[in-house]
Image: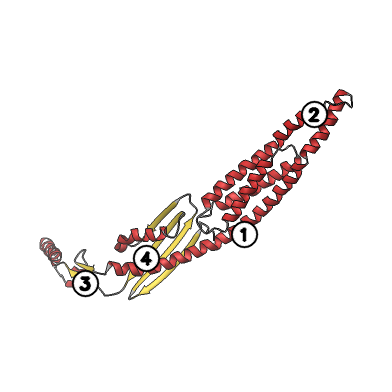
Amino acid sequence: MIRSMTGFGRSKYEISGREYIVDIKSVNHKYSDISIKMPRAIIYLEDKVRKEVLANVSRGKIDVFISMQDFSETGKEIKLNKQIAKAYINELKALANETDIDCNINVTDISRFPDVLSIKDEENEELIWSELKKCLDEAIKNFITMREIEGNKMKEDIKNRLESISKKISEISNFSSGLIEEYIIKLNARVKELMKSDIVDENRLAQEIVIFSDKSSIEEELTRLNSHLSQFISLLENSSPIGKKFDFIVQEMNREINTIGSKANCLEITNRVIEIKTELENVREQIQNIE
């Protein structure tokens, strides 16, 4: 199943007083560009998060937002920095003596000063990663599901456009098959008109017909165009990242249809060429958002 490069996925996971929330969103991008925002306390897991996302997503501008709330008591120890506390007290007493201000110092006030109290967290890193990974994997799953839903809509639209292109290629083929016969009749009539005679140099006429056939033949272009079209339809059923392959095939199809347009000496063919080029441009816009 093809995937869109646009998507969103979210997951929330709670266990033992800890809460994890992971949000993933993406838009189209030529390559893979991942931006991760997560709490400083678990920033050491950023590389693991990046690898996990890259293992599941090959292309797109992807933003990953991770939040973590830890209300558990396990592994936590309140640390009192007595040296800093005493330094605060000494300085406050000195200030009181110098300014004749009453020095009413209590423990609660001192505890509020910076670096007096700190929480030492000795949580197991592997434990935190195993919990975060569960939340991350669920978010990635939801993210990919949305990408596939969007991709399926794009697939149906592209298939309809390719069917239209295939129909127009068949019409061009039908019109081209009668071009040489039509040219023979017109050339014969024109020669007779110019020479004012019913006698025509058959050898010279045959040479002109051969030259015209070589110039106007579009059989090779139609064959390659049909081949590209079949390859495109086949790739639509492929589940691997195929956006870049689609882009290449559309370029090749445009090249062939442009050649047909330059060779065509027929209004009906020219009109079909314009219609095909319009459909190809719509397809090209769609595939810009395929992974």
**Residue to which mark 4 is pinned:** 67
Amino acid at dot 3: Glu
Q: Can residue 236 be seen from the camera position used here? A: yes
Q: Which residue is mark 3?
A: 77
The structure residue drawn at horizontal position 37% and vertical position 65%, both measured from the top left corner, is 67
Q: Nearer the viewer, residue 234 or 144?
A: 234
Q: Is residue 170 left or right of residue 157?
A: right
Residue 138 versus residue 244 in the image, above or below: below
Dot 2, crowdedness within 10 Å: few (<14), some or many (≥20)? Answer: some
Q: Report the number of discs.
A: 4
Residue 52 is labelled as none
Comes first in the chain, label 2 or label 4: 4
Relative vertical location of residue 255 with respect to residue 139 in this rendering, above or below: above
The amino acid at mark 4 is Ser
Q: Which residue is mark 1?
A: 156
Dot 1 falls on a residue whose secondary structure is helix
